[in-house]
Every structure is written in C-alpha cells, then in structure tokens.
Amino acid sequence: QVQLVESGGGSVQAGGSLRLSCKASGTTYTPYCMGWFRQIPGKEREAVASITQMGTTHYTDSVKDRFTVSRDNPKNTLYLQINGLRPEDTAMYSCAASGISGSSCAPYPSHFAFWGQGTQVTVSS
C-alpha cells in the first residue's frame, strides 16, 4: 500500500509562488506515473499535471504556462511549482500515484490507484 503525504500549501497573495511536495512511502517500487489534482468544495476534481517515471509530463491547458511538475525518483517525491498564483487557483491540491506500470500517464483519475489527503492552497487578490 502506497501512502502519499502532501505539503507546501498555504495562503499567498496573487502573483506569488508555491512549491508543493508529495512524499510517497510504503512502496518498494517507483510508481510509473504520479500526478496532481485539485478540487474546490462542491466542484469536480480537476486534473492539473502528471509525470511519468522517465520524466514525460502532461499538463492541463489552463495551467501549463505557470505550473511545473517534477519528481525525484530516488526520494519518491513529487513536486509542483506554481508561479503567478491567481485567486482561481484556490483549491485543495492532492497528489496521486499509479502502480509500477501503465499504458498512459495522462492526468485522468482512473490512471491512479493511490491518493493523498491534500494540501490547501489559498490565493487572495
């Protein structure tokens, strides 16, 4: 069973930056795919970005100019650098991990088996 713990969220002003982290534990393998999602209460979960074990990335169009996903495989840690934060980026950000292999790393929830509890990002104008 893979446990995922996010950190790095907080309250920032518009235009600021944050770096979110997601540490995976309880696994002896490197997940094929890891990703970030976000959700606002009352709304559906939204894909943000994902990255394969080899570093191939996928981004939702609305964030690709401001968000950068990366991972450190030896540390089993996933990152999300967010620049130019906007009030509409306010959400709970969660990370997710797949199994050891997969056919696609597009950021669809069905591609992920394990989920973290999330870290809150709040952006004020």
Image (cartoon, helix red, strand yellow):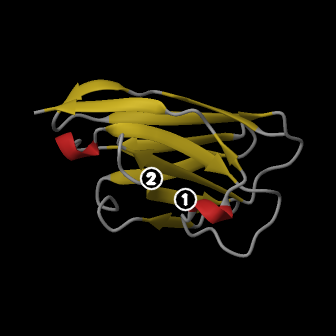
> Residue 50 in the image: x percent, y percent?
54, 59
Q: Residue at x 33, y 68 (%)?
A: 61
Residue 42 makes an appearance in the image: yes
Q: Which quadrant is the C terminus positioned in?
A: top left
In this view, the residue farthest toward the top is: 11
Residue tagged 2: 45
Q: Secondary structure at mark 2?
A: loop
Residue, x 41% and y 28% (percent of image)? Answer: 9
Tell me which corner region of the image, top left, top right, bottom left or bottom right, holds residue 19.
top left
Figure check: 44 above or below 106: above
Frontmost residue, 27 versus 79: 27
Q: Position of residue 42 (x, y in %)?
A: 35, 45
Question: Farthest residue toward the right?
Answer: 28
Task: Locate residue 46, reporting x and y percent.
Answer: 42, 56
* Left or right of residue 1: residue 53: left
Residue 24 is left or right of residue 26, and the answer is left
Can you say whether 106 is above or below 38 in the image?
below
**Which of the two residues, 85 or 90, is positioned nearer the viewer here?**
90
The amino acid on which the numbered mark 1 sits, given as a three-letter code, is: Ser
Q: Which amino acid type corresponds to the residue marked 2 in the rendered image?
A: Arg
What residue do we see at 89% from left, 42% from top?
A: 28
Residue carrying label 1:
50
Closer to the chain start, of discs 1 and 2, is 2
**Disc nearest the viewer among 1 and 2:** 2
User: What crowding class fits label 1: few (fewer than 14 Cα within 10 Å), some (14-19), or many (20 or more)?
Assistant: many
